[in-house]
Amino acid sequence: MTDVVDSDELLRRIQRARSWAGREEQTWKARSEELRTGDPDSSREAELRGHTYEAVRKALDEIVTPGVHDVDD
């Protein structure tokens, strides 16, 4: 994996990763809600996964548009 990519391609890859992380975030948070009453342990695990993808998405947001996002958001 020694391919050299230009800045435009790198930005496209980061934006794809950011979109994917956002979709995963929503999927896991929705799953957490679905499991909340029937399986609290799995609900907490799904919620944690959702927060993990949220952190990844926020980091990628900051790379793509630095300074625009509230740190406490």
Image: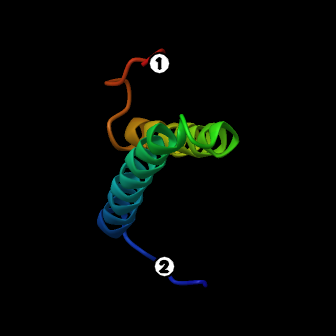
From the top left corner, tell me how far across and down residue 17 is, in percent: 41, 59
Contact, mark 2 vs mark 1 (Cβ under 8 Å): no
Count of numbered circles in the view: 2
Q: Mark 1 Cα within 10 Å, few/some/many (few <14, many 20+)?
A: few
Snapshot quadrant of residue 43: top right
In this view of the protein, which residue sits in the foreground, 48 or 37?
37
Q: Quadrant of residue 57?
A: top left
Q: The residue under label 2 is which amino acid type?
A: Val
- Quarter of the image where one finds residue 62: top left
Kindly report which numbered mark, 2 or 1, lies closer to the viewer in this rendering: 1
Image height check: is 55 above or below 19? above
Q: Is residue 60 above or below residue 72?
A: below
Where residue 67 sits: x, y (%)?
37, 24
Q: Residue 4 carries which label?
A: 2
Question: Where does label 1 land, which residue?
Answer: 71
Amino acid type of the residue that numbered disc 1 sits on in the rendered structure: Val
Position of 16 compared to 59: left or right? left
